[in-house]
Image: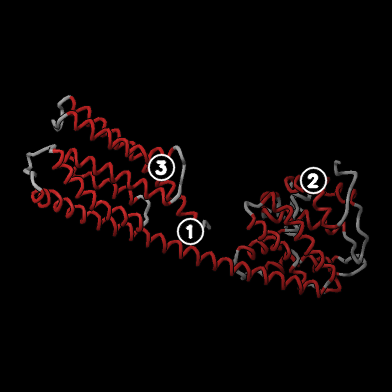
Amino acid sequence: MTNWKEYEKKNDIEADEIIAKAAEIAAAVLLAVCFMNYLDIIFHIEKYLTFIGCFTSVIFLCIPCVLINKLKNKKTTLRYGILICILIAATIMYAFFTYHASLAFILPMVIASFYADKAIYIFTVVLSYFSIIIGNIGSIWLAVDTSEHRNTLEEVVYKGILPTALFYTVVAIIEYMSIKRSNDHISQIYYNAINLEASHDEMRRSQEELVYAIAEISESSSSQTGSHIKRVSKCAKIFGKYICKDELECEYFSVASMLHDVGKLMIPNSLIEKKGALTDEEYAIVKSHTDEGRKLLQNTPGRIMEMARNIAYYHHERWDGKGYHHIAGEDIEFFSRYVAVLDVFDALISPRSYKEGWSTEAVYDEIVSQSGKQFAPEAVRLFIKCYPELLEVYGLEDKCHIKS
């Protein structure tokens, strides 16, 4: 889950880029206005005043563009400076163009809303009222346009400042409510996501604790089975680095693999640790541990348990279809194909009550020879790649197959 502060930072950076583009567009429009006024196409305001007004406004609009695009400074204090520059540009535009630029004061407010920050927005709105007053008074001093009979301070207040401020207030309130509603909605989404993530974490911990509890039961009932599942889990974590999409799934795989032999809890311990060869009837009973494992985990919820349920059922299937349930190739569950290799690897290399452990060379050759037969080819390829790491779990080394 993305941290809330990281989300806000990303949102502000995107807003910076939008604001820089908006300032560039506004500057280009002003230059176009200045050119068209010079050709007497629009406004017909004194050309010298138009040039001064446009030029100074463009300068203040370019400052944010430089700060955002060139300096790449993302500090909050800088954003207040950017909005002040835009407010100054709006004030100059109104002072020089009077009612022709009535919407100029909307520009800072719209730009401030991109940050979705109520403090920045209120700061911009408050300063905008000062800009409205200064802009209207400036228009008297410059005497840009007298057609509206705004020759006195009283006329400017009643015909300029108050109507503009009233219109601005209505728009500002609507925009503020929109920002508040948007922020409340985002906050609720984030709050729900945090709670959901916490619930998932709690469920995951519960599943892990259940797996460890079952592992301890297995170890207490059979020292062979208990040690075996722990070693397979360590090896699964090594494989997980290459076959899992992220660290969390890797952890799931490692934990779930501990339950691959959970069905053996339903098999008589005398058969599990029998020193001699099993009869056909006894072997059939031992083979049933895959079915028993799936039954034990059938109604347990969660991703770990789902993964464990599949591994418990499929890990004795063969790629050629000659396994316990005669399931072949791609029909064998993905993670189970890899546990099948690790299960046999541990069974061969570890001593059991009925046999001695094989040499590292013999185990390696046996597993590699079964690629495309007993094991999935991709699982054997990963075994070859991870072989040195797997041996470290057992404190062993194979000089014949590990390149120096």
Asked if disc 3 and disc 1 are in contact, CB closer than 8 Å, the reply is no
Asked if residue 67 lies left or right of residue 315, the reply is left
Query: What numbered label is drawn on residue 17?
Result: 3
Judging depth in this view, the residue of 151 and 331 nearest the camera is 151
Quarter of the image with the C terminus in it: top right
Q: Is residue 233 visible?
A: yes
What is the three-letter code of the residue carrying label 3? Answer: Glu
Q: Earlier in the sequence, mark 3 or mark 1?
A: 1
Q: Closer to the camera: disc 3 or disc 2? A: 3
Residue 91 position within the rendered picture, expressed as x and y whole percent measured from the top left:
24, 44
* Distance in Å between CA atoms under marks 3 and 1: 20 Å
Q: Earlier in the sequence, mark 1 or mark 2?
A: 1
Name the residue rendered at 14%, 37% in the picture: 144
What is the three-letter code of the residue carrying label 1? Answer: Trp
Judging depth in this view, the residue of 301 and 95 nearest the camera is 95
Name the residue rendered at 33%, 52% in the picture: 113
* Distance in Å between CA atoms under marks 3 and 2: 49 Å
Name the residue rendered at 75%, 53% in the picture: 318
Residue that mark 2 sits on: 384
* Distance in Å between CA atoms under marks 1 and 2: 43 Å
Asked if residue 358 lies left or right of residue 175, the reply is right
Q: Secondary structure at mark 2?
A: helix
Asked if disc 1 and disc 2 are in contact, CB closer than 8 Å, the reply is no
Q: Secondary structure at mark 3?
A: helix
Q: Secondary structure at mark 1?
A: helix
Query: What numbered label is drawn on residue 4?
Result: 1
Judging depth in this view, the residue of 333 and 12 nearest the camera is 12
Residue 188 position within the rendered picture, expressed as x and y whole percent measured from the top left:
41, 64
Q: Is residue 99 visible?
A: no
